Image (tube, helix red, strand yellow):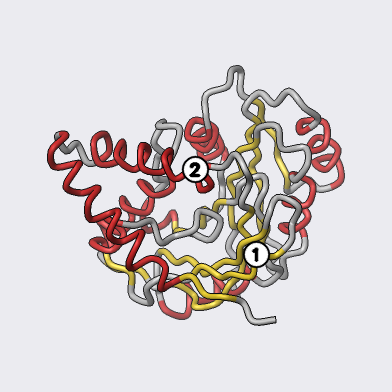
Amino acid sequence: MEIPLVSIITPSFNSEKFIAETIQSVQNQTYQNWEMIIVDDCSSDETVSIVTKMTLLDNRIQLFQSEKNSGTGIARNTALTKCKGRYISFLDADDLWKPQKLEKQIDFLKTNNLPFTFTFYDCIDEEGKSLNKTVEAPRNLSYRQLFFCNYVGNLTGIYDVNYFGKIAISSIRKRQDWMLWLTILKKIKTAQPITESLAFYRIRENSISASKLDLLKHNFAVYRTFHGFNVVVSLLCMTGFLFTQLVIKPRYIKTIKS
């Protein structure tokens, strides 16, 4: 049975507190045919030193360093050029995967003959403690649904290079993942998630998800820049976005029962 290589793209910047645990969550995968491409965006802490030591112990981990700080979009694109796997997946330097994440996704893709899938995920705080909630998504996610809300957690998405080719990441500093999934859904129309939480998303105090004002600003930029809409149309789209965020999206956030 073919066991295709999975390429994991991980941008890092001042991630010394989390990066070792993130890498270990990949090493703990039951699916072992992977390569992890880490591109450091000019960290000023011990991130590079930590990753370098781990590359010496596991040659599936590769480290590349940016010449200047350019943002996660550029870092992800740099990693993309290094990827050799049939499948491309994403894991930021502070998030974690559950052990069967890759195995279940590859099996799901093969069994259902799909080029793309994603999963649900749990939320943890900066110290790794559970926030007792799981973020789910529509079972048959359409382009229209995705247009008004990014239901795909970046740490859960995986796509088939044989079907899409390598999809370039936007150089915009925020929301590149949403634009990537929109590009994918524009081609395949709908996407099916694995209806199970297979990852941990870390919510940090200074993260984009923690700032509602920044979220609005960067989502508006997606409508203006990625979609190319004028200001009026972009504002109308933002109305739909806000309605989705306030009324529809909360239905997909479930409390984890102790």
Q: Residue at x 44, y 66 (%)?
A: 117
Quadrant where the N terminus is found in the figure: bottom right
Tell whether 50 sits left or right of 241.
Answer: right
How far apart are labels 2 and 1 at the CA level?
17 Å
**Residue 131 marker:** 1
Q: Label 1: state its secondary structure.
A: strand
Type of the residue with mark 2: Ser
Residue 102 showing in the rendered view:
no
Residue 105 showing in the rendered view:
yes
Please report whichever mark, 2 or 1, sits nearer to the chain's N-terminal start: 1
Quadrant where the C terminus is found in the figure: bottom right
What is the total number of numbered labels drawn onto the structure image?
Answer: 2
Task: Name above or below for residue 14 compared with residue 147.
Answer: above
Q: Residue at x 79, y 47 (%)?
A: 20
The spot of residue 223 in percent (x, y) is: 25, 41
Task: Name above or below for residue 257 compared with residue 79.
Answer: below
Give the class, few, some or many, for how many residues have Cα within 10 Å of label 1's Cα (few <14, many ≥20): some
**Residue 211 marker:** 2
Tell whether 128 sits left or right of 149.
Answer: right
Type of the residue with mark 1: Leu
